[in-house]
Amino acid sequence: MEKTWGPWDDVQQRQFFDRGFVPRESRVIVVDGRDVGRLDISHAHLEIFLGLIELLPEAQGRGLGSAIIRDLQKEARTLHVPIRLQVIKANAEAHRLYLRLGFKVKGETKTHHLLLWQP
């Protein structure tokens, strides 16, 4: 985050979170009875938008993110809709993960790559 927007500002981040948080689109990721992350997905008639996938550091690197995205891809295949997402340019690891799972870069903003997966 700091690579893209500069030093962390708690007040600014809280305002950003409050504006973007939609409870009906958020899910808590639970592994072995422990909360380890958050997933925001919105379903539209023509697509699924993966708004956010966050995992605690101790839950990363174990294939959990890949498994979650593959499950979402199965759902998208069933619904015959694409999955769209954006990934911050500074997060090269997440970008590589999405490309490995079949997402294609379809554009970019100053701060993000725009990706699409088609069933």
Image: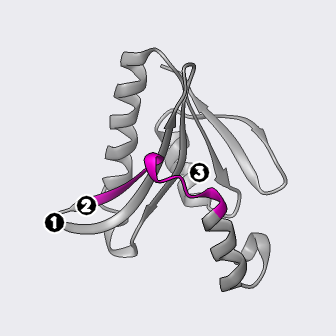
Q: Is residue 106 above or below residue 26?
A: above
Disc 1 residue crowd, few under 14, some 14–19, many 20+, Cα 10 Å: few
Q: Is residue 20 magenta?
A: yes
| Pointer 3 or 1: first along the chain | 1
Residue 25 pos. (x, y %) = 47, 46
Magenta residues, as a range? 19-30
Label 1 secondary element: loop
Q: Which residue is mark 3?
A: 95
* Identity, as a three-letter code, of the amino acid under mark 2: Val
The front one of 70 and 51 is 51
Residue 116 pos. (x, y %) = 61, 31
- Give the residue displayed 69% in from the left and 64% down from the top: 90
Q: Which mark is residue 33?
A: 1
Disc 3 residue crowd, few under 14, some 14–19, many 20+, Cα 10 Å: some
- Give the residue displayed 56% in from the left and 34% down from the top: 103
| Pointer 3 or 2: first along the chain | 2
* Identity, as a three-letter code, of the amino acid under mark 3: His
Q: Are marks 3 and 2 in contact (CB under 8 Å)?
A: no
- Give the residue displayed 31% in from the left and 54% down from the top: 64
Disc 2 residue crowd, few under 14, some 14–19, many 20+, Cα 10 Å: few
* Identity, as a three-letter code, of the amino acid under mark 1: Gly
Residue 41 pos. (x, y %) = 48, 43
Q: Are marks 3 and 1 in contact (CB under 8 Å)?
A: no
Q: Which mark is residue 30?
A: 2
